[in-house]
Image (spheres, rainbow, N blue to C red):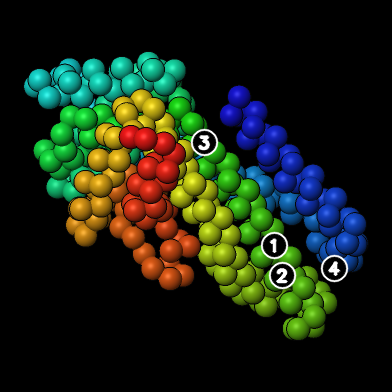
């Protein structure tokens, strides 16, 4: 279903952009200046979605390598047995297949889930979380991560990133071509101005467009918390978030590529807040409290 959504989204982006360009007469202008906008759109879509989906397909492998996570194939301790059994119970209740369960070495209390298929995901928790959280809190954190998997957040985030990438690649080259023709008066092919402006435009547009991706990432955290509350209890979810807030000053030990998937992220202020993958923990706690009695 999500592969069909990916294809439909890709097609919709190309179709909407094509119609918009035709109505505005931009296609005629580009054609006169040596740019086939249809080919450019296809080029942008292919490269825009390829990167995000290759990353998604490799996410489990890369997550294990980046964090040093050890998958629990055969539990060696009662704690590991409880962890595997708890994940199995939560996954069954959420209606997904049993994920791989892993522990990664980090003193920070953290956890993440990743994988491109609901029924073949990876759920990992840090050693610090297992050492300092009680079982109810750990269960709530696991419910939160299972919620991400059940909601299909990893695939949806890849779709949004692909759309954003497509827009950035396409718009940057259109801007580069216009500046090359109008400002640098280059009438024969593409000059150095096209390439320089395209690169600068990609950087600027990429930063601006990333705020959309980060906005979705923050919204999905609220949904995952609701899933965690439904699976493990609202009071346990609130307690787990409160414990994470107490440890929010601990330096983030998650690799940059996985920070969007971790449950514990430090708060930022000002414009930097637009580039946060997670909302402030106090906002998450307040949302759960307002949703109903614990």
Q: Position of residue 5 (x, y in %)?
A: 64, 32
Q: Earlier in the sequence, mark 2 or mark 4?
A: 4
Mark yes or no: residue 147 visible.
no
Q: In this figure, which residue is indicated by the disc labeled 2?
A: 175
Q: In this figure, which residue is indicated by the disc labeled 1?
A: 171
Q: Residues within 10 Å of mark 2 (few under 14, many from 20)?
A: some
Marks 1/2: CA–CA distance: 6 Å
Q: Position of residue 274 (x, y in %)?
A: 48, 62
Marks 3/1: CA–CA distance: 24 Å
Q: Earlier in the sequence, mark 4 or mark 1?
A: 4
Q: Is residue 256 left or right of residue 194?
A: left
Q: Residues within 10 Å of mark 1 (few under 14, many from 20)?
A: some
Q: Quadrant of the C terminus?
A: top left
Q: Are marks 4 and 3 in contact (CB under 8 Å)?
A: no
Q: Earlier in the sequence, mark 3 or mark 1?
A: 3
Q: Give the structural element (helix, strand or loop) at label 3.
A: helix
Q: Residue at x 39, y 27 (%)?
A: 230
Marks 4/1: CA–CA distance: 16 Å
Q: Are marks 1 and 2 in contact (CB under 8 Å)?
A: yes
Q: Give the structural element (helix, strand or loop) at label 1.
A: helix
Q: In this figure, which residue is indicated by the disc labeled 3?
A: 155
Vertical side of 200 occupied by 62: above or below = above
Q: Residue at x 37, y 55 (%)?
A: 280
> How many numbered marks are there?
4
Q: Give the structural element (helix, strand or loop) at label 2.
A: helix
Disc number placed over residue 33 in the picture, else none: 4
Q: Is residue 146 left or right of residue 140?
A: right
């Amino acid at each position: 279903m999500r592969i069909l959504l990916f294809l439909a989204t890709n097609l919709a982006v190309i179709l909407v952009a094509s119609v918009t360009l035709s109505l505005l007469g931009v296609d005629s202008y580009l054609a006169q200046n040596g740019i086939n906008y249809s080919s450019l759109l296809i080029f942008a879509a292919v490269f825009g979605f390829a990167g995000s989906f290759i990353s998604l397909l490799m996410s489990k492998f890369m997550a294990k390598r980046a964090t040093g996570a050890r998958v629990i194939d055969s539990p060696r301790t009662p704690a590991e047995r409880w962890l595997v059994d708890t994940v199995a119970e939560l996954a069954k209740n959420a209606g997904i297949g049993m994920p791989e369960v892993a522990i990664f070495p980090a003193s920070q209390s953290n956890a993440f889930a990743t994988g491109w298929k609901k029924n073949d995901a990876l759920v990992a928790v840090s050693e610090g979380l297992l050492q300092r959280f009680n079982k109810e809190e750990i269960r709530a954190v696991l419910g939160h991560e299972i919620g991400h998997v059940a909601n299909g957040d990893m695939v949806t985030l890849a779709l949004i990133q692909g759309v954003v990438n497509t827009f950035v690649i396409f718009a940057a080259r259109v801007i580069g071509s216009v500046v090359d023709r109008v400002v640098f008066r280059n009438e024969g092919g593409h000059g150095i101005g096209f390439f320089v402006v395209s690169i600068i435009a990609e950087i600027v547009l990429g930063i601006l467009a990333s705020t959309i991706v980060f906005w979705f990432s923050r919204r999905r955290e609220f949904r995952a918390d609701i899933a965690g509350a439904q699976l493990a209890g609202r009071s346990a979810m609130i307690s787990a978030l409160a414990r994470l807030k107490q440890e929010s000053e601990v330096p983030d030990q998650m690799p940059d590529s996985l920070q969007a998937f971790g449950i514990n992220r430090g708060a930022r202020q000002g414009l930097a807040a637009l580039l946060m993958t997670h909302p402030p923990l106090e906002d998450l706690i307040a949302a759960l409290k307002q949703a109903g009695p614990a």
